[in-house]
Image (cartoon, rainbow, N blue to C red):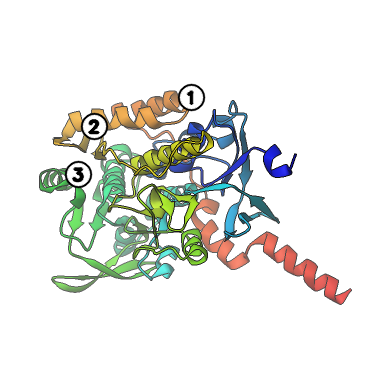
């Protein structure tokens, strides 16, 4: 009997976000060997990253280990690494991990590598305005936010105090609104009375976006309510304002009033997303078209044109103008898994992916959120209860739900923040890594240079 008939079908899934993880779990009883490749050893519950950045939750509560989640699924091999290339003819992936490179073969490929932060061609902004896409981003922002109050307390110049106590959030979508609201709660509710030389209530929180409404995709009614709540929290909302420059001590904007500079030591970026490098590479080798964000324009069944063995799902796919939200990733992951199971069973495939919109929601402050679910538009406390229930439902693992509830109780019922530890290393690691370089790459270069001289 030949090797090809002896071995089981090989499914490789790239990315352990919502799409990749739910696709993997949906294949738990499939007659296939699954390899799950991810750049980290954990699954990230990205919608709650802002709560790590503002001291409500710890990173462990929103990032459970992948191996622990899948420990009972015997047909999965979890591997650390970043896919750098795809050979669609040989059906082989090239993968890099710290200090090692390897290859993985596949029969069916699901690519769900998520999205990266987009600075709209101004990537240098990231040095001074971290995004909100990873645990590293959240920990850096936490160190910068809490560190800003500490350093403001040491200043004697009023202008320097104001600069340290001015926080600018770029992007008025859900992440930006949630960040601005939580920083305002920190300044006005959690920190007052803890400093001898400054009043945290005098902090300025400025929310900036080029669009003309906050939470624009939620509709006029909820957008207006969110704007009103932000104003009640003391957040300054600057709409139709384009960011044209970011440096260490401030941000440059163009507004209807003209060009302005906002002096601020702490900036964060929550505007715009782009497809990852793997999306561009996959498009190159398959000849698949992409949209302006670099997402692959897939067939109705989520396969890459001309390659029915490759599925692009979640944030990597462009299909029917679907938004880059968790539910799209979850449902497209399950759809891809369903198609694979049908193929293995010898059934007809190619069924169109049908997305069921379960709505959108965003918190603004404690006990206040907006939720758009079909024709139902809720705000205030009722919207917050729905937000709470949905996020508890999708938090992976019983332990994570219990500890999250305890920390929410501390933050929402009381005035404290359970996770305020921030280090100098967290605040400046990004710049240090860029200056110091990748240690594994440097060792390889040193070894190569040594072998040449030897």
Say whether residue 435 is left or right of residue 194.
Answer: right
For the residues labelled 3 and 1, the Cα–Cα distance comes to 32 Å
Mark 3 Cα within 10 Å, few/some/many (few <14, many 20+)?
A: many
Mark 2 / mark 1, whichever is N-terminal: 2
Say whether residue 150 is left or right of residue 10.
Answer: left
Quarter of the image where the C terminus is located:
bottom right
Mark 3 / mark 2, whichever is N-terminal: 3
For the residues labelled 3 and 2, the Cα–Cα distance comes to 16 Å
* Residue 222, percent from left and from top: 14, 43
Marks 2 and 3: in contact by CB < 8 Å? no
Determine which of the numbered discs, if any, sits on residue 233 in the image: 3
For the residues labelled 2 and 1, the Cα–Cα distance comes to 22 Å
Residue drawn where x is 37% and y is 50% of the image: 149
Name the residue that disc number 1 marks: 399
Numbered disc total:
3
Marks 1 and 3: in contact by CB < 8 Å? no
* Residue 312, percent from left and from top: 44, 51
338 up-or-down from 235: above or below: above
Mark 3 / mark 1, whichever is N-terminal: 3
């Amino acid at each position: 009997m030949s090797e090809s008939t002896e071995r089981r079908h090989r499914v490789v899934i790239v990315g352990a976000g919502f799409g990749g993880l739910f696709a993997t779990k949906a294949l738990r009883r499939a007659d296939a060997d699954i390899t799950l490749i991810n750049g980290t050893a954990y699954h990230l519950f990205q919608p709650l990253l802002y709560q790590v950045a503002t001291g409500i939750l710890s990173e462990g509560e929103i990032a459970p280990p992948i191996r622990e989640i899948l420990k009972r699924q015997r047909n999965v091999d979890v591997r650390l690494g970043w896919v750098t290339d795809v050979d669609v003819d040989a059906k082989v992936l090239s993968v890099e991990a710290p200090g090692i490179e390897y290859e993985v073969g596949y029969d069916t490929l699901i690519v769900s590598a998520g999205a990266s932060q987009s600075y709209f061609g101004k990537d240098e902004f990231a040095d001074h305005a971290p995004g909100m896409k990873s645990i590293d981003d959240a920990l850096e922002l936490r160190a910068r936010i809490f560190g800003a109050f500490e350093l403001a307390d040491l200043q004697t110049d009023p202008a320097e105090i104001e600069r340290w106590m001015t926080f600018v959030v770029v992007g008025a979508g859900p992440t930006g609104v949630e960040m601005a609201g939580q920083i305002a709660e920190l300044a006005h509710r959690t920190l007052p009375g803890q400093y001898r030389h400054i009043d945290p209530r005098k902090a300025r929180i400025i929310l900036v976006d080029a669009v003309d409404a906050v939470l624009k995709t939620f509709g006029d009614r909820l957008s207006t309510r969110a704007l009103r709540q932000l104003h009640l929290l003391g957040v300054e909302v600057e709409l139709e304002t384009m960011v044209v420059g970011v440096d260490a001590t401030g941000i440059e904007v163009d507004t209807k009033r003209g060009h302005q500079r906002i002096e601020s030591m702490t900036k964060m970026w929550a505007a715009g997303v782009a497809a990852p490098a793997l999306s561009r590479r996959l498009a190159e080798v398959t000849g698949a078209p992409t949209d302006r964000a670099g997402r692959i324009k897939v067939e109705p069944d989520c396969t890459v044109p001309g390659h029915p063995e490759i599925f692009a799902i979640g944030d990597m796919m462009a299909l029917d103008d679907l938004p880059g939200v968790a539910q799209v990733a979850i449902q497209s992951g399950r759809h891809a898994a369903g198609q694979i199971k049908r193929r293995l069973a010898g059934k007809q495939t190619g069924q169109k992916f049908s997305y069921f919109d379960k709505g959108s929601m965003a918190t603004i402050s404690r006990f206040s959120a907006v939720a758009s679910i079909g024709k139902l538009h809720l705000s205030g406390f009722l919207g917050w209860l729905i937000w709470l229930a949905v996020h508890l439902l999708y938090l992976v693992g019983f332990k994570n739900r219990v500890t999250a509830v305890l920390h929410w109780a501390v933050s929402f019922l009381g005035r404290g923040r359970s996770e305020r530890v921030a280090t100098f290393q967290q605040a400046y690691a990004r710049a240090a890594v860029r200056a110091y370089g990748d240690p594994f790459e440097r060792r390889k270069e040193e070894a190569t240079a040594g072998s040449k001289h030897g």
